[in-house]
Amino acid sequence: MKPLSNRAWFLVIPVMIFVLFSSVIPMMTVVNYSVQDSMGQNSFFWNGSEWFQHLFDPTTDIGGRFARALVRNLVFSGVVLAIEIPLGILIALSIPKRGWAVGAVLVAISLPMLIPWRVVGTIWQVFARGDIGLLGAALNGMGIPYNYTQDPVSAWCTIVVMDVWHWTAMVSLLCYAGLKAIPDAYYQAARIDGANRWSVFVNIELPKLRRVLIIAVLLRFMQSFMIYTEPSVVTGGGPGEATSFLSLDLVKIALGQVDLGNAAAMSIAYNLITLTLCWVFFTVMTQLDARADREQAA
Amino acid sequence: MATITLDGIGHAYGPARTEADYALKPLHHVWQQGRAYALLGPSGCGKTTLLNIISGLVTPSHGRLLFDGTDVTRLPTEQRNIAQVFQFPVIYDTMTVAENLGFPLRNRGVDRVTIAARVTEIATMLDLVPELGRRARGLTADAKQKISLGRGLVRADVAAVLFDEPLTVIDPAMKWELRSKLKAVHRALDLLMIYVTHDQTEALTFADLVVVMNEGRVLQIGTPAELFDTPAHTFVGYFIGSPGMNLLPAAIEGRRAVIDGQAVDLPAAYPAMSNIEIGIRPEFVTLAPAGGLPVRIDRIEDLGRRRLARVSLGAHRLVATVPPGYAPAGDHASVLFDPAQTHVFRNSERVQGVRA
């Protein structure tokens, strides 16, 4: 038997201290706020699970806000994924496979990703303005009523189109890498077998892209579910609360109303929901993958 | 089923200005219906290019390709009725084995009943029946390779089956089995098969006729025995056989060749020529205590069933067979050449002697 030495743990201590300060301690402050109430003057007293009870009860003011924002987040992520994943695959399929054009196209489609969030928001805020913005003015000029500061539909369309513009390229790049990894022999065999373009896509390309698509869905879900900067710049959550996503609402409660207890409970719930959904996504998709493999063995 | 004619087929990937620009130098050849051919040569010799020209994946820059007399040079792959098995098994991951086999027929709009009958027939031939309902993904490499072959055979009108080094990724133990399966399929279906490989054992065991290629040129087309006994080119002599043919620069004097001042008998008389090499296979060079050309023994290799001697004849190295029961003493011995198996090459090409 090998001699055991617990001294090895000492080597891990620096990392543990680092993680403690970088994530655990800040997180615990939030947990601390979520179970206490304050009357100001930095005096806190125990409040138990009351903040959470309010939060998960849609009949209360805060509970209603939370539920509506959560639904908005889920709808937004769903819409964004439903557009960006197919569109990203389509773009990846149209990128040339070789020649000088590859580099040019890849750089061109990646440009939006290289722009800081806040700047993206500002660009679209101006671009979509009904009076002077190129997009807004053009739409209004064509007789389509469009005003993202007053009309919820316009506001939603603006936020969704902005996100598609900002992030579809990431899906495309991942898929392009996946497509490049498919050996030529597959395409040659498909030609010999007389498969048409659609059949090649369904039977060769899509199955081979499965693993990169899992990553793409996961990343795009996480990012879109946590969206903050762009809508906060463009619509500020409005009109009314039409585009108030969880993160925007959270900031309003915490920094606008300095309602630390509610904000802390909400941010913990938000965090756990994101974590759970990602876990579910990942588990379901990898399980499907593993089941397909197990079917062979059976 | 078809006879395929290469009418001056050549290919250059860029503009062809000189001979060296051709990946495949123009050649004429007729692939006879029902025979098994092997295209043998080292990597980069143009054999895969030739195969892809036949299947239509590459359009040749020169010449015409005829299937049973019909010009198909510009016809796209899917209209050529060619089956091709690639180096790495190509299977459709999401389909079952049966769906994989039926795929080429479904794409051509064949009805379900015919497809099912045909798939069963091919699966029986390839021993894939127990696997039919399973997903093709995750099967062993040799089973996948059988599926790729089956997808080619399933079409009743297939003109030829092309193999591009199909056993590269197969376990050595399964290689032999799969190779005999290919032979059995060939006998059963009476198809033209063309098999590309750089492995001489695969080529010689599979094919009726072996086409030896090097640097884009076809050097010899012959039966395995012809390639072994009368190689048309020094490359064929060296490439076929293990170890390859001994090649020694020499001068010709009638019925004798002179190597470093030592005379060797030849099977026939040759006119005086320059740039000559003598070729003789190790099987026909015998190590003896004395009586032949004096050599120094560098090394004896015991291969179990036979022993080979690596020897030096002056500055030249050659391989000789050590006869059973002879244990060379010291590092000096002599070698005896079998005159009937001694070949003369001029500028690397075999020269026929004049028998008197």
Image: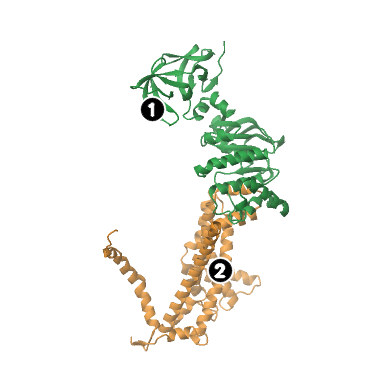
Quadrant the N terminus of chain B occupies:
top right
**Chain in orange colour:** A
**Chain in green colour:** B
- Which element type, helix, strand or loop, lies under badge 2? helix
Q: Residue at x 58, y 39 (%)?
A: B180
In the picture of the structure, the residue carrying the numbered disc 2 is: A80
Residue B355 placement: quadrant: top right
Q: Where residue B300 is drawn, which disc sits there?
A: 1
Residue type beneath disc 1: Ile
x then y, percent, for residue A225: 50, 71
Q: Residue at x 41, y 30 (%)?
A: B302
x then y, percent, for residue B79: 69, 44
Q: Residues within 10 Å of mark 2 (few under 14, many from 20)?
A: many
Q: Residue furthest front?
A: B325
x then y, percent, for residue B322: 42, 24
| Residue A195 visible in the snapshot | no
- Which element type, helix, strand or loop, lies under badge 1? strand
